[in-house]
Every structure is written in structure tokens, then in C-alpha cells.
Image: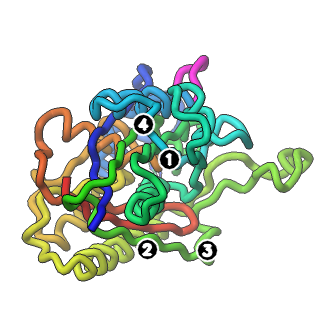
Amino acid sequence: MTSARIIGTGSYLPQRVVTNRDLEQQVETSDQWIRERTGIYERRVIGEEECCGDLARIAAQRALEAAGISGDDVDLIVVATCTPDRVFPSLASSLQRDLGIRPGATAFDVSAACSGFIYGLGIADRFVRTGGAERALVVGAEAMTRILDWDDRGTCVLFGDGGGAVLLEAAERPGVLTTHLHSDGRYEPLLYVPWGPGQGYAALGTQSGYIHMRGNEVFKVAVNTLTRIVEETLDAAQVDKTEVDWLVPHQANIRIIQATAKKLDLHMDRVVVTVGEHGNTSAASIPIALDTAVRDGRIQRGELLLFEAFGGGFTWGSALVRY
Ligand code: UT7
């Protein structure tokens, strides 16, 4: 039976570091509040000359290099983002050009907010397993700080920018074991960006183009939903929670991550946590965390990894992966 194996990972973070102390100068907040409520102490912010496509490109390039694969050998590109540089072409098509990926390959973007990477992985896994692609690049890249209202302390302290990528290859050995993708559009009022181009540019005068979030309400649904999806995922793969080697969660809030780890009876030293130094990088957070732990040697070949994410939509998703 063919499965999709991760054969390379890569990530990229912009240079500029913004600390909680920096934000104290901007809004009524404190380093202590942000650390205690979120676990975040700093985040990376995209440079004025950079754009989201740059974050995606460098992360993807690093994943290709790690796998020892040239762009010629890739036949599917999926980029998860809610902050693309243009309405179209997609970031995926731009990546195809910039990385010299074979003309005629399949390339598209996925919009599922913070769950975007899991959605991209789930789609690419289905392509690979059904013979639609031999090698697939799945990228999560976000310039979240470009859609932040820097006067809103409820959101501006939470997010950061970055890109992460994995390269999947068809194999006869186990790779992605199961993926689960969900949405419930009724929750839109709790987390959304009011304006998009479909409303026309005149509406931008009256509608904000920034993230709006009722954080506390999102928090409660996120914890409950992620607890449920962990059960669903383990049941589907008929895997016991004691078999999971690493939890690689979406990095929104350390308290949400701890709640999921507790549900799995997983000690926090088996959880990859990057929220402290990166904040919430939306669709980029899981591939960045994965790449970090692969490169520093924590995650080893053959180990069982659980990914889970929750975000605007609401959307949520999970994947169980034999690395
Ligand atoms: O990845 C996409 C999904 N997003 C998430 O998963 C985010 C989920 N939500 C959260 O992570 C948390 O709800 C937050 C970190 C956003 C907020 O933490 P909380 O413990 O839920 O705080 P809260 O919203 O209940 O606010 C508590 C207090 C309020 O003041 P009062 O009403 O008690 O006087 C807020 O006004 O904290 C105040 N507050 C702040 N104080 C200092 C809100 N933001 C700040 C801030 N600095 N930045």
C-alpha cells in the first residue's frame, strides 16, 4: 500500500525580533501578562522589503535541500496561507516558478487559517496515495503581522510571521497514517478578518482588514475540540496514546498545548513547543515546529508524530505520521 512519507523539512523566520517589552511601549500590556496567559515572550516580524512569498520560498528551498531533491522532481505544490501576496496567481504557482519546479505540475493555495498546513498535508497525502503525485511540497507561510491592528492588545501580542515546509514522497513504507479535516462556519464571529476583495474596495473604508478575535471564547472551543480530535485520530489509526512519540501542535497558546498533552498523558518534554519564541504563525506553526525538532535531533526517523491545529472558520484538523 502506497503512503506519503516526509523526506525533507525546512523553515524560515524573518530576522526582526519583537519582544513583549517592545509591545509594552505600544499597547497597555505587560511581559508578565503575555507570558502567563500565552507562553509567548517574543515573535518574528517580516521586514518591510519582504513578503509572504519570500518566507514560503526559503522554507521550501530548505525542505528540498534536506531531501536532496531538485524542483524538477516535484509534481504537486500546496501552500497554506491566509496572507498571500496577491489575490492571484497563488503563492504555490509563484513558488513553482521561483524554485524551478517542473512546468505543468499541480499548484494551488489552501485557505483554512491556522489549520491550513494540516489541510494541505491531508490533501497532498490523498494525491500521493491515489497516484496523483509522486512528490509533493506542502508549505505553510504567513505574514500575520500584516493583518494585525497594532492598537488591539487582544490580538497584536499573539501573532508572528514565518514559513515552514515538508516534502512528501510516495513510498511502500508507512508515512502519513491518517488525517482529519473539519470545519464549522457558524463560529465565524469569534475569529475573522472582516474585509476581503470580494466585497469591493469601497467596503475597505468601512470594514477593517485586520484580525478580530474573541480570544477567551475561541480558547474554550479550541481546548474542547482538540481534545476530541486527538481521540478521533488515535481511534482511526487504532493506535494507543502511549505509542505517540511526539506531539507537534499548532502553536497558539501554551495553555492550549498543555491541555492536549495532558489528554494524551504526554510529558511536556515530548511536545515540540516554539510558541515562546515565535508566537502564533498560523499555518506556518506546525511545519516550523517540526523542522526545528528534526534539525536539533529530537525527532528521529521511525517515530510516531501527532499534529493538531485549530483556527478561524472554525477549522480544525490532525494528522498521525510515522516519520
Ligand atoms: O490560532 C488560532 C486560534 N486562536 C487561539 O487559539 C487563541 C485562543 N485564545 C487565547 O489564547 C486566549 O484567550 C488569549 C491569550 C487571547 C487571552 O487570554 P485569556 O486568559 O482568555 O484572557 P481574557 O481574554 O479572558 O482577558 C482577561 C483580561 C481582560 O481584562 P478584564 O476584563 O479581566 O479586566 C482583558 O481585557 O486580560 C485583559 N487583556 C490583556 N491584558 C494585558 C487582554 N489582552 C491583554 C493584553 N495585556 N495583551
Of callouts 1 and 2, the N-terminal one? 1
Judging from the image, what secondary structure is the residue with disc 2 in?
helix
At x 50% / y 27%, what residue is drawn?
Answer: 99
Label drawn at residue 185: 3
The answer to whether 299 appears left or right of 170 in the picture is: left
The answer to whether 184 appears left or right of 126 in the picture is: right
Of callouts 2 and 4, the N-terminal one? 4
Q: Nearer the viewer, mark 1 or mark 2?
A: 1
Segment tinted magenta in the rendering = 46-51
Q: Which residue is mark 2?
A: 221
Asked whether disc 4 touches disc 1, contact meaning CB atoms under 8 Å apart, the reply is no
- Residue 10, compared with residue 139, is above or below; it is above
Q: Which residue is mark 4?
A: 73
In-front residue for pair 296/92:
92
Specify the quadrant of the image occupied by residue 29: top left
- Residue 123, compared with residue 156, is above or below; it is below
Judging from the image, what secondary structure is the residue with disc 1 in?
strand
Residue 269 in sight from this viewpoint: yes
Asked whether disc 4 touches disc 3, contact meaning CB atoms under 8 Å apart, the reply is no
Judging from the image, what secondary structure is the residue with disc 4 in?
helix
Mark 2: few/some/many CA within 10 Å (<14, 14-19, 20+): some
Label drawn at residue 76: 1
The answer to whether 244 appears left or right of 15 in the picture is: left
Q: CA distance from mark 2 to mark 4?
A: 41 Å
Q: Nearer the viewer, mark 3 or mark 2?
A: 3
